[in-house]
Image: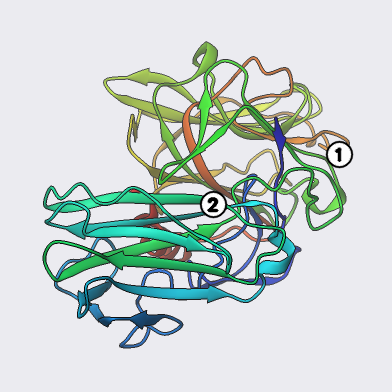
């Protein structure tokens, strides 16, 4: 099955309601829509803005928090109680599968449970196990062609009187045959979305391919650009060269990858091709942990062979080694696709999860901004 990238946002100030940051960026959301919920982490308003309730007392709370400052606390008043939000733009998703994910905290089995309702029927997902603590809960539903709404709800059903919810995410997971912002079909071959970790790449042949177009060409040209990616590697990938993202045919463009696994960590390696000799830089030691989500960033200006990239982990720059000094002028990556999780030949597959990638053309994003991105998005991945 082929599914697609929902959009690549145009250059300019793009507001991302999940990160609450203003950045000039291209945001790539692989094969799924953006989060359709407003105030999905219940940080705004008390009771949480944008949410209603039925048969319950609904408030934001600091009693149990998965990430951020608050969670949503649902206290049962009647036998079954729920908090809900209705998405107004549901019509374009009729006939498609919708998914609702969240973290839930409960102490009694079957108490905390997610539901999707399309105005015709409702579908419940599996409930919290009842083992005290936070658990991921999820439900999927195929929306009827005659659907009259799309409602996300969290229920407090049996057992004691309260449950907590945090980091809610309602989205359309497979926008098959859709197009990006520029009208280009974008294909996902094999990578599987797995909540809450992201797209899982199999170390064999999975790849997400974004066709070439002007907006994504030569991202690192003066005054520089930035690639930002959340990754959760299981190893250093196929051939010890698992690709995070690249725009290259192995002689032109650039490559960002993991490499050199040692002691439960991997290095980050960045390559920029030049007319005579490519520049290759790697982190001096293996710093990215295996089976742990990390925010990886490369900020670089390829206008001079004397420039080195800045490689950061979780918003903090780390020492790098220049493995090969560039000679000549940068070679354009125009005409080559941008691939995530692999190269074009599918011989360098990433092993693990890649949930988010952002590309900023025309700006080298600095550590304070990167640390802000890390702090505002880390809760999605258990950090």
Q: Earlier in the sequence, mark 2 or mark 1?
A: 2
Q: Which corner quadrant of the image does residue 234 belong to?
A: top left
Residue assigned mark 2: 141
Say which mark, if any, is on residue 334: 1
Q: Label 2: few (<14), some or many (≥20) within 10 Å?
A: many
Q: Residue at x 68, y 38 (%)?
A: 305
Q: Quadrant of the N terminus?
A: top right
**What SS does tag 1 mark?**
loop
User: In front: 336, or 340?
Assistant: 340
Q: Residue at x 88, y 36 (%)?
A: 335
- Element carrying mark 2: strand
Q: Nearer the viewer, residue 315 or 344?
A: 344
Q: Visible in this render: residue 5?
A: yes
Side of 9 relative to 87 (left or right):
right
- The x, y position of residue 150, in whole percent, is 57, 68
| Residue occupying image coordinates x 78% and y 37% | 330
């Amino acid at each position: 099955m082929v599914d697609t990238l929902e959009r690549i946002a145009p250059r300019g100030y793009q507001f991302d309601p999940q990160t609450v940051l203003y950045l000039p960026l291209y945001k790539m959301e692989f094969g799924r829509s953006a989060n359709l919920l407003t105030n999905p982490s219940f940080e705004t308003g008390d009771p949480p803005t944008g949410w209603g309730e039925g048969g319950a007392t609904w408030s934001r709370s600091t009693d149990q928090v998965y990430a951020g400052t608050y969670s949503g606390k649902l206290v049962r008043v009647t036998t079954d109680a729920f908090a809900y939000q209705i998405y107004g733009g549901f019509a374009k998703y009729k006939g498609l599968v919708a998914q609702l994910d969240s973290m839930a905290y409960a102490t009694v089995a079957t108490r905390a449970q997610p539901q999707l309702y399309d105005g015709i029927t409702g579908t419940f997902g599996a409930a919290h196990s009842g083992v005290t603590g936070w658990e991921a809960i999820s439900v999927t539903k195929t929306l009827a062609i005659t659907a009259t709404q799309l409602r996300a709800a969290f229920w407090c059903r049996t057992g004691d009187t309260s449950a907590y919810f945090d980091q809610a995410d309602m989205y359309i997971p497979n926008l098959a045959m859709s197009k990006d912002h520029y009208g280009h079909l974008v294909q996902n071959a094999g990578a599987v979305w797995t909540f809450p970790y992201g797209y899982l790449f199999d170390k064999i042949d999975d790849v997400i391919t974004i066709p070439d177009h002007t907006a994504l060409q030569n991202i690192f040209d003066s005054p520089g650009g930035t690639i930002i990616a959340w990754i959760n590697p299981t190893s250093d990938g196929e051939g010890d060269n698992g690709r995070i993202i690249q725009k290259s045919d192995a002689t032109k463009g650039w490559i960002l990858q993991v490499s050199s696994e040692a002691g439960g960590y991997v290095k980050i390696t960045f390559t920029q091709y030049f007319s005579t000799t490519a520049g290759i830089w790697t982190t001096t030691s293996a710093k990215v942990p295996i089976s742990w989500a990390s925010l990886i960033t490369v900020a670089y200006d390829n206008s001079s062979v004397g420039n080195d990239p800045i490689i950061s982990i979780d918003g903090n720059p780390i020492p790098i080694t220049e493995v090969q000094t560039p000679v000549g002028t940068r070679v354009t990556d125009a005409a080559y696709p941008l691939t995530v999780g692999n190269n074009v030949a599918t011989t360098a597959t990433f092993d693990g999860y890649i949930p988010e990638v952002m590309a900023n053309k025309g700006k080298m994003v600095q550590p304070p901004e990167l640390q802000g991105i890390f702090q505002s998005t880390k809760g999605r991945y258990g950090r």
